[in-house]
Image: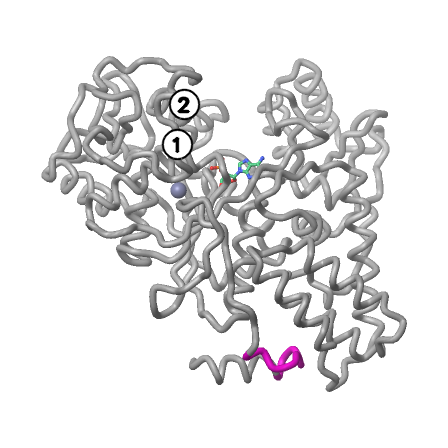
Amino acid sequence: MGLLSYLRAHLLRTQTPARNDLPPLRFTNTLSGEQEEFKPLGGPVKMYNCGPTVYDRQHIGNLRPYVFADTLRRTLNTWGHPVEQVINITDVGHLTGDNVGDADIGEDKLEAAAARKGQSAQTIAEEVTGWWFDDLDALGIERKRITFPKATEYIGEIIALVKTLEQKGYAYRTPDGVYYDTAKFSGYGKLGKVNIAGQLAGARVEENPHKKNAHDFALWKLSKEHESRQQEWESPWGVGYPGWHIECTAMIFKLLGKQIDIHTGGVDHIPVHHNNEIAQAEVLTQKQYVRYWMHNEFITIEGKKISKSIGNTIYLYQITDRGYSPRALRYLYLTAHYRSPMNFTWAAIEAADQALLRLNRMYLELPPSGMPADEKFAKGFYAALADDLDTPLAIARLWEAVRDPSMPPTVKRACLAIADEALGLGLALPRKQVKLEVIPLSQLPEEVTELIDEREQARLSKDFGIADDLRAKIERLGYTVKDSPEGPKVSKK
Ligand code: AMP
Ligand code: ZN
């Protein structure tokens, strides 16, 4: 679709004023550390968002990057850029120790979960992916526009890339795998201007004696002699599995090409994962891998890092179990800039839900009309999005418009419509306040009460992994558990 016909179709749908004067889009590029005007490489915008490692349910921190990516996609579309979007599913090779300085040690997260739960890695990956897809749908992320490749389906491509890196002299063998030689890549660490020496000084380094440099990372890991892995493949180096970083590069090359416009992920990916991706790709292609790198900051919960060991993890279903709309979480995310840390509290989700409910009601109560949105509002709203996706400012401008007593209701509705399309708030969705009916423990089937008791024991002993598994079992029997200060509250799903 040409730009003009795209804009025409778009204008008709949302009845906005002419947009040929949309300001240029500007994004903060982690590579330069500065805001830059967005200029596509040509053709549809190719965007890759680092996806989940599907060994466990994604929490509300993990979900922020996908709402950010979806809002970015909507904005690019509004500006007339079609987008080819890929989000990978990491179902092998991401190690528990894949952090600064201790990369390539630890266990494969999928294999560890399989051993812990007594289930196959594939079953876990499928179940967790299913939960994640449900969350994406609930958050208004349009899945049909996105390609979701699984790492295990790209093993052939990965092996081919590792072979080429070896032929070019950038990879070396050790007794436990094939490693990338970071000393050979002169720009190593350029993303986020990582202070390699300083970073290592502060990191927990568990030495792998066979690595030439501490930052070298595994491209292919060999299965250990007495290890029985569920997921392993033949390769020129022996039976094993891919390193996490090469997975993303292989999927990008195959699905989007050798150079892409935008690559996103959480800020934790900057120092290691994304610098490693650059090192591999740029040696393979001799081209700039990614034009714009964009990273979202982290979510904390009640002021603390989200952590299973603290036991403060919150999942989307816990928010909807309390009767809040899943879009309230989306709204809450968007009230902070994607590059700002955001603290989740139950008071904040309550306020977000109330605010969204008001917008929702206004939208549904006002009749649609052919009226365009207020021009001053539209200008200010799009200017906010153009300024490095300033969603908090865009939302503030929406409230200013809908509170303006001089603005006719039909115009307000048109303002709400353009905001909804850009931000994915789901204003047209009917609001049903889900109030789950709590069933007294004495009226539950014995099988369920036993699981509830076991789960309480696990929670008390801070075995949160076990508690989560028990929750999944309870859910499979058709019940949900909500933890409250008075103890567990159980309802029918
Ligand atoms: P993972 O499944 O752990 O690889 O994480 C999925 C995505 O969530 C990655 O892009 C991470 O950078 C991001 N992420 C992890 N924890 C948080 C958090 N607390 N807040 C925001 N993003 C996060
Ligand atoms: Zn990645």
- Indicate the quadrant where residue 247 lies: top left
Chief SS of the magenta region = loop
**Residue 63 position within the rendered picture, expressed as x and y whole percent measured from the top left:** 58, 44
Crowd rating for badge 2 (residues with CA inside 10 Å; few <14, some 14–19, many 20+): few
Determine whether 234 is above or below 428 in the image.
Answer: above
Q: Which residue is mark 2?
A: 199
Q: Which residue is mark 1?
A: 194
- Indicate the quadrant where residue 204 lies: top left
Determine whether 377 is above or below 235 in the image.
Answer: below
Q: Residues at badges 1 and 2 in contact (C-beta under 8 Å)?
A: yes
Residue 134 numbered tag? none
| Amino acid type, residue under disc 2 in the picture | Gln
**Residue 136 position within the rendered picture, expressed as x and y whole percent measured from the top left:** 57, 52
**Residue 292 position within the rendered picture, expressed as x and y whole percent measured from the top left:** 41, 53
Q: Inspect the magenta stretch and tell me whether residue 15 lies in it.
A: yes
Point out the stretch of residues depicted in magenta: 12-20
Which residue is drawn at the image coordinates 84% and 43% (left, top)?
437
Label 2: which secondary element: helix
Q: Inspect the magenta stretch and tell me whether residue 96 lies in it.
A: no
